[in-house]
Image: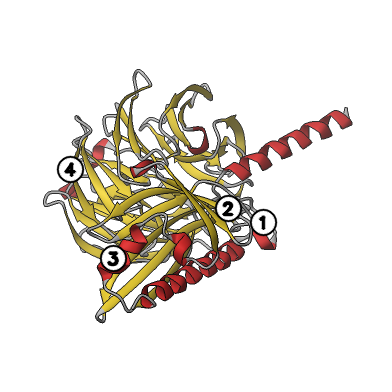
Amino acid sequence: MLLRLRAALLIIGIASCSGATFAHGPTPQKVDEKITIAAQPDEVWKVVKDFASIASWHPAVSKIKVEGSGNETTRTVTLKSGGELVDSLDAVDDKAMELNYRLQNEDFAALPVSSYSMAITVQPADGGSQVEWISRLYRFDTGNEPPEDKNDDAAVKATTEFIKAGLNGLKTKLESKK
Amino acid sequence: MRRRLAIASAIAISVAATCSHGAAYAQSVYVLSQDDGILSTIDAKTDEITDKISLDGKPAAFTIDAANEKAYVTLPDSGEIAVIDLHRRVVSARFKIGGQPFGIASDRHDRLFVGDWGANRISIVNADTGIVENSLAVGRSPAHLATTRDGDRVYVADRESNNVAVIDTSALSVLKEVAVGRAPFALALSADEQQLAVANVQAATLSIIDTRSLSVVASSPTRAMPYGVAITNDNSEILVANQHGGSVSIYDARSHLEQGEIKVGRYPEGVGTLADGSKAYVANWFSASVSVLDLKSKTEIKRIACPEGPRMVLVAGQPD
């Protein structure tokens, strides 16, 4: 009797755990990074809007595979660390010079997040450009007791580093063209 | 002495018939900020924040019980519901119900319907005692809830199951699970309670459910990541907040075609409209601001700075 009750409790426990891994969790986190680049906005935007270009400027990226077209475009970004990020393109706004995409997979080896959406915008600034890269993301473990490497801080830290490295790589690529 | 609050709604609450005469009411707009844990009140005449109530935690969603002048706020991280006395403007109770409470609705009969994001169920909570009296299995990751005026039905957006669960609140049973687009998150019930608008985040569509046949009668494409939805009280327009692109799209509520788009702050989420349909308020999650939209001219007329992480807006009116 007692044994049966325990088994039932165990099943409930498993059920709620598996629910949490599918879910995106309750508190979205924010990352906001900017960089100025000594290149004209249209020149910068041409690189940023090309969904395949990340392999040519992000130092953490080793390989990219782009599939589909238009709003059905997805890319598989393989990182030098070994992980993979599968991104789906949401919008390319030439007028606002804004690119939007979001994560389709979960890969702890790539980034300790369960989901993110990204927006990269290009604006004129001081004769050159300012690129702003923002993200809304959820930690990898969306349960209420996440371990340290899967909590909000870990997710924000890793995503901030990924974005910063990308912006620096973008700057290097565009400024070395001159 | 009990003043009556009348409610116009964004996500969880439909509009009380008593508040359709906008001029007779001083309306308040309530904005819930998750990161700073604050419920702000905006005076709809001056469009300024007049009051802030601290929740001590990371509140995700709330509902207002008009007759009792109370707001009930979910705190998923701590498994709590905070009860706010809107008259005294204080947190008057905290119910520890456990799990990850997210979407919430009141059945107007002292029962709260609370979605548990991680456990895929709706808890039925006594609004006075905080005791969980019952629970009902729904689809995966219940997000926002909407309820009818007399509380006979609750609609639940089951985000990870791609459907809307329709709950009969007297029988405490799921009448139907209506398949919608991928990742439904926000809901809005029209004032006549005939149509339910559903914003599907991943599909980038707006589904319209006929509440009599409980079937999807229209589906319109939206911009990327629609996270908030509201219907004006006269049932003429549906407002959808698009996180990507930072805008609110306005749809004709009959043809379900997009009529216009208004740029707002970044990553907008919850939307609420005033009872007379003159203005709408949009929570800009990333920008930590509220956009005030003039619905006649279809323009943003003000942006109000607010505490960090605003996600949900409800509009309530009360007699002057």
Q: Are marks 1 and 3 in contact (CB under 8 Å)?
A: no
Q: Amino acid at mark 1?
A: Pro
Q: Is residue B57 visible?
A: no
Q: Residue furthest top?
A: B213
Mark 4, residue position: B21
The chain that hosts pointer 4 is B
The chain that hosts pointer 3 is B
Mark 2, residue position: A84
Mark 1, residue position: A146
Distance from Cα at disc 3 to Cα at disc 4: 26 Å
Q: Earlier in the sequence, mark 1 or mark 2?
A: 2
Mark nearest the camera among 1 and 2 is: 2
Q: Residue furthest bottom?
A: A126
Q: Amino acid at mark 3?
A: Ile
Q: Residue at x 54, y 43 (%)?
A: B128
Left or right: residue B189 versus residue A25 is left
Distance from Cα at disc 4 to Cα at disc 1: 49 Å
Mark 2 Cα within 10 Å, few/some/many (few <14, many 20+)? many
Distance from Cα at disc 1 to Cα at disc 3: 34 Å
Q: Which element carries disc 3, helix, strand or loop?
A: strand
Mark 3, residue position: B304
Q: Amino acid at mark 2?
A: Glu
Q: Amino acid at mark 4?
A: His
Mark 3 Cα within 10 Å, few/some/many (few <14, many 20+)? some
Distance from Cα at disc 3 to Cα at disc 2: 40 Å
Q: In this view of the protein, which residue sits in the foreground, A9 or A159?
A: A159
